[in-house]
Image (tube, helix red, strand yellow):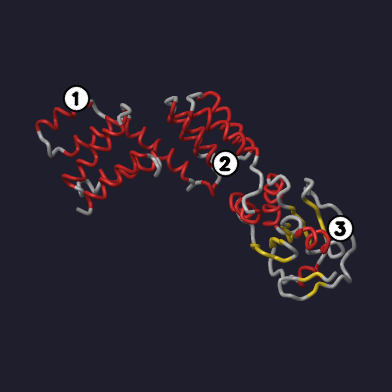
Amino acid sequence: MAIIGPSGRPLSRSGGNGPVQPGAGTSGPNIKDSGIETFAADVLEASREKPVIVDFWAPWCGPCKQLGPLLEKVVNEAKGAVRLVKINIDENQEIAQQLRIQSIPTVYAFRNGQPVDGFMGAIPESQLRAFVQQLTGGSAGVSAADDTLAVAEGAYASGDLATAAQGYAQALQDEPGHPKAAAGLARCYLKSGDVERARKTLQLVRPDGAEDEAIRAVEAEVKLREQAAQAGDTAELRARLDTNPNDHQARYDLALALDAKGDRTGALDTLLDIVRRDRNWNDQAARKHLVTLFEAMGPTDPRTIDARRRLSSILFA
């Protein structure tokens, strides 16, 4: 059978370096090395049963050394939903030429004997996982870290902080830098009142997870806890407001004090009152603090939804 590349041109079976030897680091039942002699069976025919990812690499390629282990890890985590075939282009220049590989690493995904997706260069693990999920239609198995994370989330929801913290820590060990695991462990520290350890835990997140919603929420909560440490006495602040209702600093400090006592709804109401009275006070400090509260609570929290609606009514009235 002729091997057809993306250009529509057949790959020749002649030439090549014969059977390839297993490459260093290649492991797992769904991962193998291949070459010109076995490409048709390993990729084209195999892709009629399940998607096949082809990794074009070379021993001298630095980015290939970064991408390869991550790609193998994600494929192994898919638990048989996808296969990985590795092609050393130094030993299989004919394939590289026919498939017009311009740079490495280059990754092609095949389904039903045809290339359907691909990318060039090393990409983060989270993007690799999304690539596999899209290729398999979401049928790829979850990682060990995700399994552990689900248990930890359940423990946290039930109030079992010790079990939750242990689960989040194990998920971080299974997958270093996992954003939701780092955020969960930091939440446990916050719940126990250890703001400093929560802050340090957030530093464990991998670079591509820094903007994860869970990380941003805990970062906002850490910021709120730090500000709460500066809060004054609520009775004294209310007395100042009774004397001068336009003392916005006192009202702002009261919002901090209320939040420090666990009255987040009261803090939201107080900040909204400042925006209603003088939205530009102190460079819109009240509105900015509301945004921090929204991030800490998350976009689906009923308090966030209600306060956002009320804020919009004030700003656009």
Tell me the tag on residue 235.
1
The residue pinned by badge 2 equals: 178
Q: Check disc 3 and report its element: helix, strand or loop.
A: loop
Q: Earlier in the sequence, mark 1 or mark 2?
A: 2
Instruction: In the rendered structure, find residue 20 and report the number of the disc placed on it.
Output: 3
| 295 relative to 171 in the view: left or right | left
In space, the residues marked 2 and 3 are separated at their CA atoms by 35 Å
Q: Are marks 3 and 1 in contact (CB under 8 Å)?
A: no
Q: Which structural element holds mark 1?
A: helix
**Residue 167 in sight in this render:** yes
User: SS at mark 2?
Assistant: loop
Task: From the top left corner, tell me how far across and down residue 279 is, in percent.
Answer: 20, 48
- The residue depicted at 70 percent of the width and 56 percent of the height is 64
Quarter of the image for residue 35 reads bottom right
The correct choice, above or below, for 68 with respect to 38 in the image is: above
What is the count of numbered marks? Answer: 3
Judge whether 283 appears above or below 248 on screen. below
- Percent of width and height locating residue 75: 70, 49
Mark 1 neighbour density, 10 Å: few (under 14) some (14–19) many (20 or more): few
Amino acid type at mark 1: Ala
Task: Decide which of tag 2 and tag 3 comes sooner along the chain.
Answer: 3
Disc 2 marks a residue whose amino acid type is: His
Q: CA distance from mark 1 to mark 2?
A: 43 Å
Query: Seen from this angle, which residue lies furthest left?
Result: 243
Circle 3 crowding by C-alpha within 10 Å: few under 14, some 14–19, many from 20: some
**In percent of the image, x 19 and y 34: which residue is there?**
250
Task: Classify mark 2: residues with Cα within 10 Å, few (<14), some (14-19) or many (20+).
Answer: many
Residue displayed at 32% across by 31% down: 228
Q: Identity of the amino acid at label 3?
A: Val
